[in-house]
Amino acid sequence: MSAVLETAGVSVHFGGVQALSDVDLRVEPGQLVGLIGPNGAGKTTFVDAVSGFVDCTGEIALDGRSLVGLSPHERARLGLARTWQASELFDDLTVRENLNVAARRPSAWTVVKELFQADPEAAPSVEEALAVVEMEWAAEVMPTDLSQGQRKLVGVARAIAMGPRLLCLDEPAAGLDTSESEDLGQRLRALADRGNAMLLIDHDMGLVLSICDLIYVLEFGRLIASGPPDEVRRDPKVVEAYLGSAAGEVVE
């Protein structure tokens, strides 16, 4: 089976600091893959490298096509979408308009048409994406009127609305309570079961271990383990890396 995302030897240096070292990772169609590790392990740096926001060495391929040398917007056009730890939304647009910006691929004709159409209709994927995160009620709400957790959900919906080949989620459950996190996990799992490929970073070990098909573990920029959740949670290197607040969640 051809991988949606495949990386080989991805490394990132910031001056004299090696943030990532030879990271090999693979996401198959319909897989929900987790990327975990302690704070500072290099998880977000890896997503930044994959999405083109930091320079790296090594190979990154999306559906077999190399992304090396491509800008972030070129990678997005090829089907790579991501969310951010901070809920970066357009606060002067409604929630629906935020998603519509991501979902639409305007042609020259639609640009001309919209010069005479003040309120273009939202694409069907926008409504579907809002339904995934149960935020249909907020379609006409301004982002400034939402809680931090709700803003995170809108960010997830905006990425889903792009209809990406690969969706990279950077701590989507941050700011959500336990019930909201569990519900989001069920919906992400359902998306994967429908064939969507996703890479999930989150510190909620209960979430990651319960919904992911495969998990990769980073520590100090290096992969220390990978495999199915039950195998990873029992790996001594993983338990040692998580000594502290998350250790119990890993081994339970």
Image: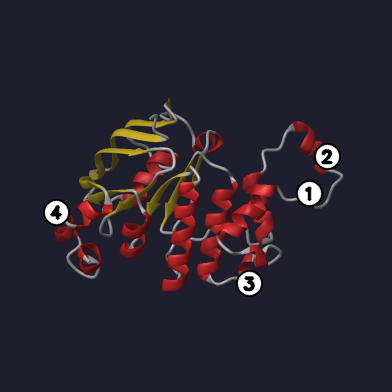
Q: Which residue is mark 4?
A: 237
Disc number lying in front (4 or 1): 4
- The Cα atoms of the two marked residues, 4 and 2, are separated by 58 Å
Image quadrant containing the C terminus: bottom left
- Name the residue nearer the viewer: 153 or 194: 194
Q: Position of residue 230 (x, y in %)?
A: 24, 55
Instruction: State the SS at label 3.
Output: helix
Number of residues whose C-alpha sits closer than 10 Å to that of mark 4, classed few (under 14), some (14–19) or many (20 or more): some
Please tell me which of labels 4 and 2 falls first in the chain.
Answer: 2
Image quadrant containing the N terminus: top left
Number of residues whose C-alpha sits closer than 10 Å to that of mark 3, classed few (under 14), some (14–19) or many (20 or more): few
Please tell me which of labels 1 and 2 falls first in the chain.
Answer: 2
Name the kind of residue labelled 1 in the image.
Answer: Pro
Number of residues whose C-alpha sits closer than 10 Å to that of mark 2, classed few (under 14), some (14–19) or many (20 or more): few
- Residue at position x 50%, y 38% from top? 165
Q: Which residue is mark 1?
A: 120
In this picture, residue 79 sits left or right of residue 136? left
Q: Position of residue 201 (x, y in %)?
A: 37, 54
Q: Which residue is mark 3?
A: 145
- Residue at position x 26%, y 55% from top? 37
- The Cα atoms of the two marked residues, 3 and 1, are separated by 23 Å
Q: Position of residue 141 (x, y in %)?
A: 68, 67
Instruction: State the SS at label 4.
Output: helix
Please tell me which of labels 3 and 4 falls first in the chain.
Answer: 3
Q: Position of residue 204 (x, y in %)?
A: 34, 64
- Residue at position x 53%, y 41% from top? 164
